[in-house]
Amino acid sequence: MKTGRTEAWLARLSDPRGANDRFRPRPFDVAERGQMERLVALAARHNVRPAFSRNLLRQLKEAPQDFLTGDAQAAAATSSWLSDHANDLRVGDFARASLLAEVAGTVREKIAAAALPAVIVKGVDFAEVAYGGLHLRTFSDVDLLVRPDAADALGAILRDLGFTEHVPSGKRVDYTERAWTRADHHGTTLVEVHTDVVHAPELRAAQSLTYDLYADPALGGVTPAARLVLAALHGSTSHLFGRLQYVVDGLMVARLDPDPDELLVRAKRSGATLPLVTMLRLATEIYGCEISADLLRRLGPLRWGGLEARLIPAYMVLAAKGEGRWMLLPQRYIYRRLLRTTF
């Protein structure tokens, strides 16, 4: 299956470091406003809108003819409308990220004061450490990874900050995440507390990333290699790489240049070799990331590697939020089965 034009533009404009020259799709005609609106909506569904919006603004400023063709006057008007729309979305995403980062900062200070074995993970952390700022990664909550014996103490901190815990439903009681919410002037703020990055009980026999594994002082604490393992496990075990954001997370953390030997140790301990191979391969195929390609070679040949690449090809990730996404679900569930049987 070939990558469609809209998905190709998504791939071209979703790299936080700038345009991705591996994709050079044909421009939209000025009459195809609906397709351009679909592209912007697709970036939101893939959770890559901040970087996409910035790159789109640059595209329209520096080379509008490569994105939009047609009557010059109509093209100028469409470009102006699209620029305003992208800028408004970008400002809104940054405002939301800033509010959540403020909450994360308060929680982080409380954790440090109490010397709790807990750490901020994923959204805020990736944005600040790997993406270069809150303006380039969207997220909708604050995620914490805590050692199980400190979960009650962390809960007391969240309660003091006005958060309310939500008891999970019966079928999710064995999952390793708990939700806490607080009504704020801008809406509801969600904090998710995890004791293992791998939530599903049926997967934890093969994969696991607890606080002690993630922040292990013997391996340097929370390092780029630790974040890369987390990104891979989150993208695979929780979401089966159903959004482009999970690939971009791996791309940006890989650009922190994690130590290959440390990565091998961490991958083996967490059963994360297969998820890492998938994520690094996708970052290489979609964005041409040389560091990802080198780390992939360092991981060595993988049992079921050929099947893995056929089950989660690059075009499927790009099409994961498109109209034909339901046709791709069987491949994802076979991949999930592979996660359970590969060690």
Image (tube, rainbow, N blue to C red):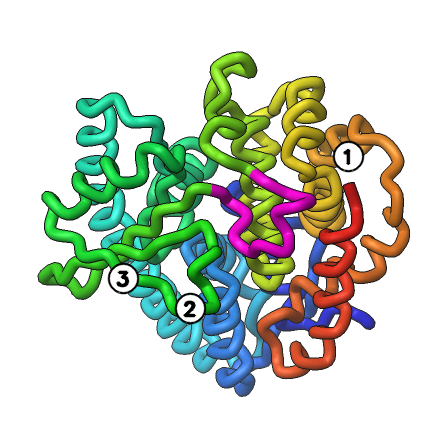
Taking the image as shown, residue 154 lies to the left or right of residue 37, namely left
- Label 1: state its secondary structure: helix
Above or below 138: residue 256: above
Q: Nearer the viewer, residue 248 or 212?
A: 212
Q: Quadrant of residue 288?
A: top right
Taking the image as shown, residue 332 lies to the left or right of residue 303, namely left
Q: Nearer the viewer, residue 214 or 77?
A: 214
Q: Residue at x 45, y 81 (%)?
A: 74
The verdict on residue 202 being magenta is yes
- Residue type at tag 1: Leu
The verdict on residue 317 being magenta is no
* Residue marked by disc 3: 166
Q: Residue at x 20, y 29 (%)?
A: 109
Q: Residue at x 52, y 71 (%)?
A: 42
- Residue type at tag 3: His
Res 170 label: 2
Number of residues whose C-alpha sits closer than 10 Å to that of mark 2, classed few (under 14), some (14–19) or many (20 or more): few
**Over which residues does the magenta segment extend?**
196-208
Residue 264 visible from this viewpoint: yes
- Residue type at tag 2: Gly
Q: Are marks 2 and 3 in contact (CB under 8 Å)?
A: no
Determine the CA span between mark 3 and mark 1: 40 Å
- Label 2: state its secondary structure: helix
Determine the CA span between mark 1 and mark 2: 39 Å
Quadrant (top left/top right/bottom left/bottom right) for the C terminus: top right
Mark 3 or mark 1: name the one nearer the start of the chain. Answer: 3
Residue 77 is situated, as x and y percent measured from the top left of the image, at 39, 77
Query: Between tags 2 and 3, which lies in front?
Result: 2
* Residue marked by disc 1: 296
- Label 3: state its secondary structure: strand
